Image: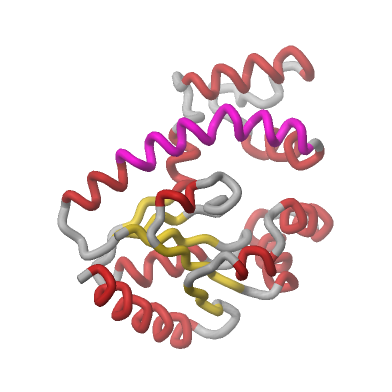
Amino acid sequence: MIIGVTGGIASGKSTVARAFAALGVPWVDADDVAREVVEPGEPALAEIAERYSRVEGPRVLQEDGSLDRRALREIVFADPAERQWLESVTHPRIRQRLIVHLERLQAEGAPYVLLVSPLLFESGQSEMADRCLVIDVPESLQIARTAARDDVDEAQARAIVAAQMPRAERLARADDVIDNSGDEASLKAQVAELDRRYRELAG
């Protein structure tokens, strides 16, 4: 059984995944795979570099040839058409690799596995999951955490949150929800309860 785990930026997806991992549940993170597909030597990075070197000079590449994530993020958040283009290049490749990772984890015999993805619904990755778990926090908390964690100003943090699926829509598509606005003990209790339920369903 595959549980898709999603939530807005800075909602605590990785924290939740680690709490499940402490109970023996393996996970694959779509963000990690997204970084893999744009590493030097990957076809996706070559496509990105070609597109933006024509337009604005090689500013999306760092001196060592790796992707300058901040520069690319500024471009795609400023222009929805550029974001769509980037997703058309990366999403199919990410999906292919996720399938490989998930199949490997399933073969290792876990009762269920987690697919952690910030774009679970937007990218269609939810179709790969048997259930979808949304990690939910108020938008004000998302903005504060994003600004602190990613060293961006509040305006950019708000723009990042606004560019994502609306909170209400995400919640409407959830099979299960974890409220991550409380303390660590509350989070662990919710994870333990869901783990019990998922093991029953998987069994």
Q: Is residue 32 above or below residue 59?
A: below
Picture mark count: 0
| Residue 145 shown left or right of residue 182 in the figure | right
Query: Which stretch is magenta?
Result: 80-100
What quarter of the picture does the N terminus occupy? bottom left
Q: Main secondary structure of the magenta part?
A: helix
* 190 or 15, nearer to the observer: 190
Q: Is residue 139 above or below residue 4?
A: below
| Residue 129 shown left or right of residue 173 in the figure | left
What quarter of the picture does the C terminus occupy? bottom left
Point out residue 57 in the picture as x, y percentages from the top left corner: 75, 16
Point out residue 90 in the picture as x, y percentages from the top left corner: 54, 32
Q: Quadrant of residue 110?
A: bottom left
Residue displayed at 46% across by 37% down: 94
In the displayed orientation, state which residue is furthest to the right: 155
Residue displayed at 65% across by 54% down: 150
Q: Quadrant of residue 58?
A: top right
* 132 or 32, nearer to the observer: 132
Point out residue 140 in the picture as x, y percentages from the top left corner: 75, 72
* 117 or 153, nearer to the observer: 117
| Residue 130 shown left or right of residue 37 in the figure | left
Residue displayed at 52% across by 23% down: 44
Residue displayed at 46% across by 81% down: 187
Point out residue 91 in the picture as x, y percentages from the top left corner: 53, 36
Q: Give the color scheme: rainbow, by chain, secondary structure or one colour.
A: secondary structure
* 159 or 172, nearer to the observer: 172
- Say whether residue 94 is magenta: yes
